[in-house]
Image: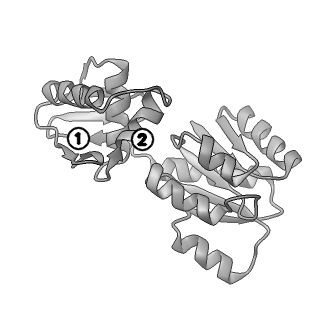
């Protein structure tokens, strides 16, 4: 599971990263809001954000997350304890709000709870097909269907964010890590997936990307 962390205090950022790494999480961390917006791949399982950071603050960053990695849980960890900040955070879509100072174990428990509740491991995507979001395996009536790595990753993005548009840029960032990929390459993979999964409702949203309807 991947965690993206935004925290400008150097020692706290490193302590959090070390602690979460010990519990088998992959960590991507930033100390500056603008740096995160420019460099983050927006393909994490969960985001942990401080609010009061240099550059784009946590409130601005969560709005980017809602557009670039929709549906993912976001925890704010902050010294802001006023009800206005808390209310604004939840209005922007945060999943949890942790006030500093806090115990690292408390943060871990909140992360674990959100990941459990945010991930339906087995997702029916047609009447007879199921996709596992943990193993990225497709099954047809219980039998595993072989897919290429790119096909599995595309299907993961579509299934994880089902009923939401996945933009071309999101596909490129997550699967090809910003390499130059033509849109028709993505279309070709989608066509192969449709051929492999009869009844799959993947819609092309003209000029934007694709959406899996379930």
Tell me the residue that label 1 is attached to.
Answer: 125
Instruction: Establish if 14 lies above or below 197.
Output: below
| Mark nearer the N terminus (1 vs 2) | 1
Instruction: Establish if 80 lies above or below 144.
Output: below
Q: Quadrant for the N terminus, please.
A: top right
Q: Is residue 57 left or right of residue 156?
A: right
Tell me the residue that label 2 is attached to.
Answer: 170
Image-quadrant location for residue 189: top left
Q: Residue at x 74, y 51 (%)?
A: 32
Q: Is residue 14 left or right of residue 154?
A: right
Per the model, the C-alpha gap separating discs 1 and 2 is 20 Å
Judge by depth and name the residue closer to the eye, 120 or 211: 211
Q: Residue at x 28, y 27 (%)?
A: 138
Q: Residue at x 81, y 55 (%)?
A: 103
Residue count near mark 2 (Cα–Cα under 10 Å), binned few <14, some 14–19, many ≥20: many
Judge by depth and name the residue closer to the eye, 182 or 125: 182
Judge by depth and name the residue closer to the eye, 70 or 142: 70
For label 2, the SS is helix
Residue 95 position, x and y percent, is 55, 62
For label 1, the SS is loop
- In the rendered structure, find residue 171 and report the number of the disc placed on it: none
Q: Is label 1 or label 2 in front?
A: 2
Residue count near mark 1 (Cα–Cα under 10 Å), binned few <14, some 14–19, many ≥20: many
Q: How is the image coloured?
A: one colour
Q: Is residue 12 left or right of residue 196?
A: right
Q: Residue at x 13, y 26 (%)?
A: 195
Q: Is residue 171 visible?
A: yes
Residue 66 position, x and y percent, is 47, 57
């Amino acid at each position: 599971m991947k965690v993206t962390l935004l925290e400008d205090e150097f020692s706290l950022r490193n302590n959090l990263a070390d602690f979460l790494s010990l519990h088998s999480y992959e960590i991507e961390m930033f100390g500056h809001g603008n740096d995160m917006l420019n460099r983050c791949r927006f393909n994490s399982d969960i985001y942990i954000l401080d609010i009061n950071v240099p550059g784009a603050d946590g409130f601005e960053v969560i709005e980017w997350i809602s557009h670039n990695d929709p549906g993912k849980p976001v925890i704010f960890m902050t010294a802001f304890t006023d009800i206005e900040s808390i209310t604004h955070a939840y209005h922007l879509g945060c999943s949890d709000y942790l006030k500093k100072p806090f115990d690292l174990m408390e943060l871990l428990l909140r992360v674990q709870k959100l990941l459990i509740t945010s991930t339906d491991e087995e997702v029916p995507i047609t009447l007879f097909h199921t996709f596992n979001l943990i193993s990225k395996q497709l099954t047809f009536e219980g039998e595993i269907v072989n897919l290429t790595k790119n096909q599995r990753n595309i299907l993961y993005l579509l299934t994880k964010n089902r009923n939401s548009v996945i933009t071309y840029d999101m596909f490129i960032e997550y699967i090809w890590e910003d390499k130059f990929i033509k849109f028709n390459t993505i279309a070709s993979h989608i066509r192969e997936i449709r051929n492999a999964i009869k009844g799959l409702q993947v819609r092309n949203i003209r000029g934007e990307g694709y959406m899996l309807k379930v």
